[in-house]
């Protein structure tokens, strides 16, 4: 089948790299579905990012009686496995060379912005509500809002359906 000129032009005009953040919430899953669809349409590389917040790590380490370094390794491995399971659960994503799973530590909005800059992404995709949406949004603004205000590229905010 011969591609129409419009189809070829559409694929080259989209972002080459797309970053989607996930906290495993329903909104984040919907954002991942949308990002995956866009990555397929534009033949883009999709970076799936999960940020682990370390603010409670010392207390968890003390309560669990597990050294902080060991707990950090365990949490990192568990979150990586959750990312892999999430993608598996959603079905085949396509060319495995076009998907990269990333876990990192820090504040979600800061790490999303940092990774977007480091990777040179053309689009960030985020759900509009996550696990901490109610109280945190009222006090500080949501992660999506913070990213939207400071992003180096366009941001697609996907609402919960």
Image (cartoon, helix red, strand yellow):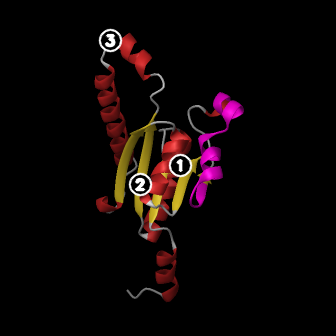
User: Is residue 39 magenta-colored?
Assistant: no
Report which residue position mark 1 lands on: 30
**Residue 126 visible in the shown view:** yes
Report which residue position mark 2 lands on: 47
- The x and y percentages for residue 95 are 31, 63
Q: Residue at the spot x=30%, y=28% of the render?
A: 74
- What's the distance in space between the residues labelled 3 and 2, CA to CA? 34 Å
Given residues 3 and 119, the one toward you in this image is: 119
Query: Relative to 125, does residue 141 appear above or below in the rendering?
Result: above
In the image, taking residue 46 as reference, residue 6 lies left or right, namely right
**Residue 161 visible in the shown view:** no
Query: Relative to 83, does residue 64 appear above or below in the rendering?
Result: above
- What's the distance in space between the residues labelled 2 and 1, CA to CA? 15 Å
Q: Earlier in the sequence, mark 2 or mark 1?
A: 1
Q: Quadrant of the N terminus?
A: bottom left
Question: Over which residues does the magenta segment extend?
Answer: 135-156
Residue 65's tag is: 3
- What's the distance in space between the residues labelled 3 and 1, CA to CA? 37 Å
User: Is residue 154 magenta-colored?
Assistant: yes
Given residues 89 and 65, the one toward you in this image is: 65
**Which residue reaches farthest right?**
138
In the image, taking residue 19 as reference, residue 80 lies left or right, namely left
Q: Residue at the spot x=33%, y=44% of the render?
A: 84
């Amino acid at each position: 089948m011969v591609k129409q000129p419009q189809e070829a032009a559409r694929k080259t005009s989209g972002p080459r790299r797309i970053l989607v953040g996930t906290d495993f919430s329903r909104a984040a899953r919907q954002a991942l579905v949308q990002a995956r669809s866009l990555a397929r349409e534009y033949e883009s590389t999709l970076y799936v990012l999960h940020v682990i917040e370390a603010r409670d790590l010392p207390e968890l380490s003390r309560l669990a009686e597990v050294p902080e370094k060991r707990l950090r390794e365990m949490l990192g491995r568990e979150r990586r496995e959750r990312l892999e399971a999430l993608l598996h659960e959603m079905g085949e994503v396509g060319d495995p060379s076009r998907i990269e799973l990333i876990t990192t530590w820090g504040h979600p909005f800061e790490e999303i912005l940092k990774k977007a800059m480091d990777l040179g992404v053309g689009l960030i995709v985020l759900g509009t509500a996550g696990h901490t949406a109610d109280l945190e949004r009222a006090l500080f603004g949501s992660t999506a809002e913070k990213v939207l205000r400071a992003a180096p590229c366009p941001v697609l905010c996907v609402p919960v359906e």
